[in-house]
Image (spheres, rainbow, N blue to C red):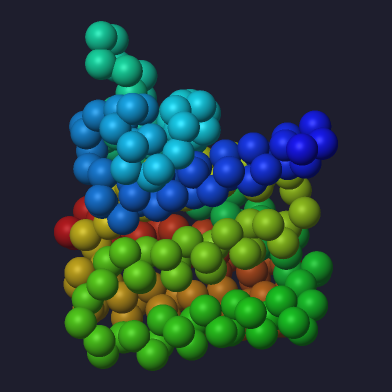
Amino acid sequence: MPEDSAMTEASLLGRSVHRRIRQMVLSGELTSGQSLSVPALATELGVSRSPVREAVQQLIYEGLAVSAPHVGAKVAAVDDDRIRDVLAVRAALDGLAAAAAATRLTEADLDTLTGIVTAQQAHLNDRADPARDAQLDLEFHTFIRDASGNTCVVDELARLEAQAHLYRGDLWCSARNRRVALREHRRIVEALESGHPESARAAAEAHVQGLLTRLARH
């Protein structure tokens, strides 16, 4: 096999393993404090230890895992103080990302965001599925983040959003919280459709502030 092809396959496998373990963490399949055993995960996923080891290191960088002496790595626990700090920074960066995206989004991009909101609406009266709803929420914010075109904002928000989801998974069990989040997402899309950066910034910041209020109430 050519060297370049081997490197490409290894890279694709590494990204796939990282996505899978990351999803296991964010969905609660791997819970806070649980050991991220490289041998055990490699066996479960049917891969070698190398891509698992790299994935775990990436999770540590993202704040989803921590290195534990004599244990290796384990899923991080995000406490009340930490989440307040995370969301304070997220509010500012989400606002910055939305303001930048407002002048860059195409009609096709707006259709994609509308599609995510429509999917959230369609599931609103279904039985609670925190993994599904958290994934749709993450897709929504990731799309806006990436559309900002600011790589510094993209990188930092990727870490902060992941940590926020690690903390708040059970919020999606509440029908009221799902309705409020949907309403706030619609306001963000409307602001982005207007093309006004400050309107988009305000809507995005208000959404994160609303999340902080819901967390306090929860």
Residue at (28, 10) in percent of width and height: 69
Count of numbered badges drawn on the protein = 0
Above or below residue 44? Residue 183 is: below
Q: In which quarter of the image is residue 130?
A: bottom left
Quadrant where the N terminus sits is: top right
| Quarter containing the C terminus | bottom left
Residue 164 seen in this snapshot: no
- Which residue sits furthest top? 70
Residue at 49% across / 81% down in the picture? 117
Decide: is 9 above or below 136. Answer: above
Q: Nearer the viewer, residue 112 or 70?
A: 70
Give coordinates of residue 30: x percent, y percent: 26, 44
Where residue 209 sits: x, y (%)? Answer: 41, 58
Which of 61/97 is in front? 61
Tell me what residue is drawn at x 25 percent, y 29 percent.
Answer: 35
The answer, for residue 174, to whether it is visible in the render is: yes
- Say which residue appears at 52% left-offset and 79% top-offset: 116
Q: Would residue 89 be found to the left or right of residue 64 on screen? A: right
Q: Nearer the viewer, residue 128 or 168?
A: 128
- In this rendering, the answer to whether 159 lies above or below 209 is above
Residue 93: x and y, percent? 59, 48
In-front residue for pair 55/200: 55
Residue lying at the far front in this picture: please name it: 1
Vertical position of residue 70 compared to residue 209: above or below:
above
x%, y% of residue 22?
Answer: 42, 46
